[in-house]
Amino acid sequence: MGLDGVYLPSFNSDLKHINFPKKKNFFIIGSAHNNKEIKRKELQKVDLIFIASLFNKKKTYLGFNRFLILTKLTKKKIIALGGVNNKNIKKLNLLNVYGYSGISLFNPKKNGPQKIEGR
């Protein structure tokens, strides 16, 4: 299909894809919310791990301290998710994250145009 990557959600624990050869520049990305899911993503040989939810207070809310602890449990590159916006984006510099993503940060239709500061 000519894809350049695949996303494995936190509930996906399948290891079958490891048996297939991985082409150059093909990324496997996974998401996690706790230590058990992070270890599963490492077994799945992901390149990046989305950890959520950092700021968004929903079912998977971690908060700053628990998020920081989880990032220290792996050597994989971490992407921060969940409630990232202009008000809290500078706090990401205190975390060891490879990157971040946030719908409200990048979706001007939802919250009006925003100036993106930081990374």
Image (cartoon, rainbow, N blue to C red):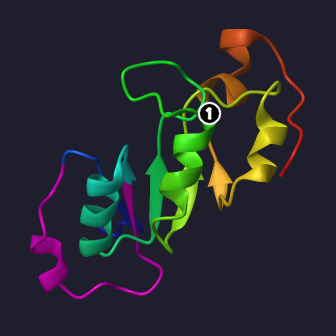
Disc 1 residue type?
Answer: Gly
- Position of the N terminus by quadrant: bottom left
Q: Is residue 55 magenta?
A: no
Determine which residue is flagged by label 1.
102
> Along the line of sight, which residue is nearer the eye, 102 or 58?
58
Q: Is residue 14 above or below residue 18?
A: above
- Residue at 66 percent of width and 55 percent of height: 99
For residue 2, side relative to residue 43 (left or right): right
Q: Is residue 62 above or below residue 3?
A: above
- Residue at 23 percent of width and 88 percent of height: 21
For residue 59, side relative to residue 84 (left or right): left
Q: Is residue 28 magenta?
A: yes
> Along the line of sight, which residue is nearer the eye, 93 or 50?
93
Q: Quadrant of residue 39?
A: bottom left
> Along the line of sight, which residue is nearer the eye, 18 or 23?
18
- Residue at 51 percent of width and 75 percent of height: 75
Q: Quadrant of residue 102?
A: top right
- Neighbor class of circle 1 (other Cα within 10 Å; few <14, some 14-19, many 20+) is some
Residue 3: x and y, percent? 36, 66
Q: Is residue 75 visible?
A: yes
Residue 109: x and y, percent? 69, 13
**Residue segment shown in magenta:** 12-30
Q: Secondary structure at mark 1?
A: loop
Residue 12: x and y, percent? 18, 51
Q: Is residue 29 above or below residue 18?
A: above
Q: Is residue 80 visible?
A: no
Residue 112: x and y, percent? 79, 11
Number of marks: 1
